[in-house]
Amino acid sequence: MRVKYLALIVSALCSTGVMAAKNNVSLEDKLAQLEARLESAESRATNAEAQIQALQQQQTPPDNSVPTVAVESAEPVSSSAIPKLTLSGFGDIKFYGDVEFNMDAASKTGALTSIKTSANENWASGNNERWDINGRILLGFDGYRRMEDGNFAGFSVQPLADLSGSMFLDDAAFFFGNENNWKIKVGRFEAYDMFPLNQDTFVEYSGNTANDLYSDGYGYIYMMKEGRGRSDHGGNFMMSKTIDNWYFEVNTLLEDGSQLYVDQQYHGIDLENEKNVAYVRPVISWQDDAFSAAVAMEKNLVTNAYGYYDNSGKWVDQSDRTGYGLTMTWNGQKNDPDNGLVLNASTAYMDATDETDFTAGVNGLWRNFELGYIYAHNQIDEFNTANFDADCDNDCWVTDPGDYDIHTLHASYLFPNVMKMKNFNIYLGAYASWVEAHPNEGESNNDDRYGGRVRFKYYF
């Protein structure tokens, strides 16, 4: 730029010399005018350079405002081979997870219904008390992309590892739609919760998948979960729509329906799977401020999906199942997080082949303390005692047609922010259950179960 200025000065001097010859204006006046022009041009150039630097700073935020990922190398590298983390740039990527370890003490295991405290645990029965340490570590990876018109698409995958050394999968789903409007979701996940248990820490038979919910020889706590999803033997396809305070959802679950029953046994009969079931589960929910309510239905649409052949060789269908549910919630923590009261009241009814099941529950949460009660009634019309496993007689209490009632009290308490860490909590949980068996033949009998848990929960 200085060279240009010198060239401009030489040119100007030459031109001013010629002009001086033609005009009587003094050389000193011309030089003064030229110097003023040069100072003005240099000032404009300085201002333009400052504007360019300002635009560059706007396009590239300061380093102290941008989250960074530090990459360290295990061995020296050259400046041209520095380790780096590269993302595709198509949307937001989120990495997260949680640690959940439990210390349990419980009476007889498997004596009420299926032991299914998490997606990765197998059902197990026995007469012994249980002292146990169990749990898992979950890793989550979410992707999300949103357009200016509200359209979005994304995915979620959540692998987990438990203390037995096994690897499992919680959610694996792809979704797309328009924000606050409509959404389509496909994969492995859970649909709308029609029987919320609030701060549930240790209710052994609650279950959280569509598999192993029914244990032959024990009671069934029906909670509108058969078509909810997160199955180990199938997948979901869900469509949902939001209109003002209304929310509509239809979830379809395709799976091996005989996996609902532990060991594929139902009423003393070994089931044979002929084709997959198709559960359709519509939900209608309404919410206004702290109050919300939802009604739902779930039904298997495929006839003769599973069953058995009787002594004459005739096929007997066992796959006819239709359920109904209603739940209502008051969430006072929306307006008062510290002192708000959360109340849930839910009921569910299952009309199945040779059996009907009714469940009702209520629970409340206030200042980290939760207390709840669940009542279940099973009416069994037929039961093949002759084929029933004799080894179960010592522990099973549903062995004949009749009425069976289950009562459960459950409670938990949360210790938040352990060691002043907002991502570290400890829960204390306990439950007590008692059963009343009224078979059509034989004497009525009662029994009870109980358990306690300390849960360590750490988020990252």
Image (cartoon, helix red, strand yellow):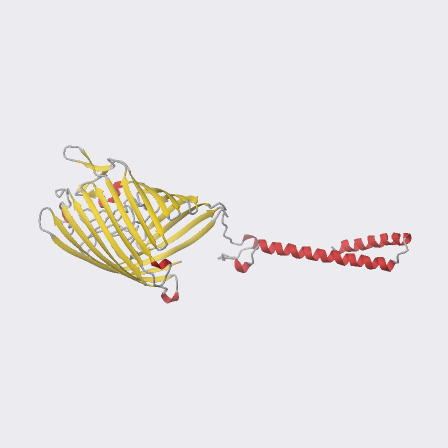
Can you say which quadrant of the picture contains the C terminus?
bottom left
Q: Position of residue 231 (x, y in %)?
A: 31, 45
Whether 427 is drawn above or below 152: the answer is below
Give above or below for 109 relative to 152.
Answer: below
| Residue 211 image offset from top left, x and y in percent | 27, 46
Q: Quadrant of residue 329?
A: bottom left
Q: Position of residue 280 (x, y in %)?
A: 30, 40
Furthest-bottom residue in view? 419
**Residue located at (44% from left, 52% from top):** 94
Image-quadrant location for residue 412: bottom left
Q: In the rendered view of the protein, which quadrant contains the N terminus?
A: bottom right
Can residue 52 be seen here?
yes
**Quick check: can you spot residue 169?**
no
Judging depth in this view, the residue of 423 and 74 nearest the camera is: 423
Quarter residue 2 falls in: bottom right
From the viewer's perspective, is 151 left or right of 53?
left
Q: Tell me: 232 left or right of 399.
A: right
